Amino acid sequence: MRKPMIAGNWKMHLNSSEASQLAAAIKNGLDPQLKHEVLIAPSFTNIESVRKEISSSPILLSAQNMCWEEKGAFTGEISPIQLKDAGCDYVIIGHSERRKIFSESDEVLNKKVKSALKNALKVIFCIGETLEERENQRTYKVLQTQLNGGLKDISVNELSNIVIAYEPVWAIGTGKTATPQQAQDAHIFVRKEIERMLGAQASQSVRILYGGSVKAENIDELMAQPDIDGALVGGESLKADKFLRVIHYQPVLSK
Ligand code: 13P
C-alpha cells in the first residue's frame, strides 16, 4: 500500500509571519485521524518560522531546492547539511522552474538527488513535459530521459526515500489541469519505466504525485486514479481553506 501525500510548494511567496500563520492554519485544520502525509515547502528564509509552528504536528517540512555540495565556496547556495540542520525532512529537486529558468540539467539534478539522500533528506523528484513536447508526441520520451538522467545509479533502497512528482509544465500555474486520465496515463508510464530501471517491487511501491493546477475542485477526481498517489500543489496551497480541502480529498469514481 502506498501512503498518499499532499504537498504544498509555496514557491517564492510569503514573508516569515505570513508563512507561520499559514502553517498554523493548516496544522489547526488537519483532521487528527488523517492517515496520509502532508508536507509544506516554504522559502529558505521561512523554514525556521514554519518549523517552529509545525514541530508538534505530523506535517513534514521540505525545502524547494539545494546545492549538491555539502559545504565550501558556493556563494548564495544552501547545502543538504544546512537543510537537515534547519529541520527539513524533504527537498524538492528538479522542479520545472529550476530546469527551465535556472537551466538545471539532468546531470546536475542527479548530483543533487544523490547528495540529498546521502545527507538523510528525502526527495520529491519532479519531471514533466512542455506543451510543445506533448503536442509533438514526445511526452513519454521526455519523461524517460528525465527519469533515467535524474535517477541514474539510484538503488532500489534509495528509491524508497524518493517520491516522484509528475508535473506537466503546461499545467503549472495555468489553470489547465491534466485530465485525470491524462495524469493516470503518464503515471502508468512512469511506473513502467521505474520497473524497467529498478524492478517490479520498486515500481509498485514508489509514490507518484500529480502537480499542475491542482485545486479543491479537481483533487477528488485526480485521487480516484489508481496510480496517482498524491499531489504537489502550488497556488492552491497558499490559501489555508482551499489547501485543507485538497488535503482532505474524497476520491470519487471518475465518469
Ligand atoms: P500550481 O498548482 O500553481 O499550478 O503549481 C504546481 C507546481 O508547480 C507545484 O510544484
Image: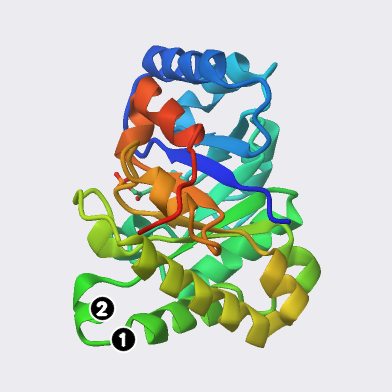
Residue receiving disc 1: 138
Can residue 95 be spotted in the picture?
yes
On screen, 86 above or below 100?
above
Q: Residue at x 31, y 62 (%)?
A: 179
Q: How far across and how far down the image is residue 149, in percent?
A: 53, 79
Q: Looking at the picture, which amino acid does disc 1 mark?
A: Arg
Can residue 75 be spotted in the picture?
no
Q: How far across and how far down the image is residue 101, in percent?
A: 27, 59
Crowding at mark 2 (Cα within 10 Å: few <14, some 14-19, many 20+) = some
Q: How far across and how far down the image is residue 199, in percent?
A: 73, 82
Residue 56, located in which quarter of the rendered image? Answer: top right
Q: Looking at the picture, which amino acid does disc 2 mark?
A: Arg
- The quadrant of the rendering that contains the C terminus is bottom left
Q: Residue at x 44, y 43 (%)?
A: 76
- Near-viewer residue (28 or 115): 28
Crowding at mark 1 (Cα within 10 Å: few <14, some 14-19, many 20+) = some
Which numbered circle lies on residue 134?
2
On screen, 63 above or below 164?
above
Q: Secondary structure at mark 1?
A: loop
Is the Cβ of the residue at disc 2 closer than 8 Å to that at disc 1? yes
- The quadrant of the rendering that contains the N terminus is bottom right
On screen, 197 above or below 112?
below
Q: CA distance from mark 2 to mark 1?
A: 6 Å
